Amino acid sequence: MQKLPAGIQDFSRIREENYLYVDKTKYIIDLMEDGVFLFFARPRRFGKSLICSTLKYLYQGRKELFKGLYIEDKIDWNKMNFPVIHIDFSKMDLKKLPLDHELDTNFIEICESFNLIPTKNGASADLQMIINHFAKKNQKIVIIVDEYDKGLNDFLDNPAIFEENKKILRGFFSRLKPNDIHIEKCFFTGISKYGKISVFSALNNLTDISLQQKY
């Protein structure tokens, strides 16, 4: 009898430890085909993090994790070997440490995972450096951002920090549109849309799929 994956958000652990998984990979194919820059809003505990995790392993080419699932024989796995940048804001304790510090720290770890030396100029510069590195190898990258709006939702009662975090996010995400030729997929999740309008003001090619019928 399979175990229920209560509270488990990592697709790899669910599959490798034989937890029950309801196959939603048919919809993952739609996500792959519905454009490059996608935004998906849902309340907490609606499976956003699991979708992000599933996309990460898919684009990394972890075919063994998808054995027996709908998607297994529907894509060309020889093409699924992308460098993946996965930013999970939900794991950042922004009440203790400021957003820019947490984002910079996160990108130091991301750089090291690619065997790259961080720029020491912050997350935005590190992101550009990673993009440039793989562009020189003619490799597109995948960017997955989970709960982009945590730095805003956590400070609804503190307008000063709210506005500062909005400025940080806007500056960081403004790196993406000029580099769209080097990006295979950019997938954002969030709880709210209010930040989408201002935070992504420079990213006007972002498609909101939150209310599309098939999703």
Image: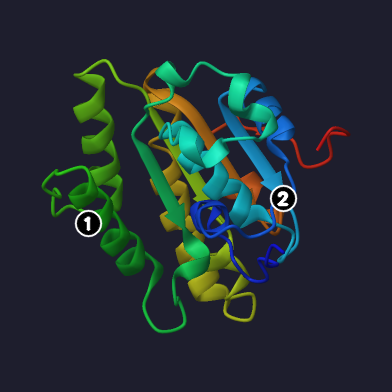
Tag 2 or tag 1, which sits nearer the N-term?
2
Q: Is residue 165 visible?
A: yes
Specify the amino acid type for callout 2: Ala
Q: Which residue is mark 2?
A: 41
Q: Which residue is mark 1?
A: 108
Q: Is residue 50 left or right of residue 171?
A: right
**Residue at the spot x=19%, y=19% of the render?**
136
Quadrant in which the N terminus appears: bottom right
Please say if 163 is above or below 188.
below
Seen as rendered, the residue at the extreme front is 1
Specify the amino acid type for callout 1: Ile
Q: Is residue 136 left or right of residue 3?
A: left
Please say if 163 is above or below 135.
below
Q: Position of residue 27 (x, y in %)?
A: 73, 33
Q: Position of residue 20 (x, y in %)?
A: 69, 57
**Residue at the spot x=68%, y=35% of the render?**
25
Seen as rendered, the residue at the extreme right is 213
- Who is closer to the viewer here, 23 or 176? 23
**Residue at the spot x=71%, y=66% of the render?**
44
Indicate the secondary structure of the residue bearing disc 1. Answer: helix
Asked where in the image residue 108 lies, by quadrant, the reply is: bottom left
Indicate the secondary structure of the residue bearing disc 2. Answer: strand
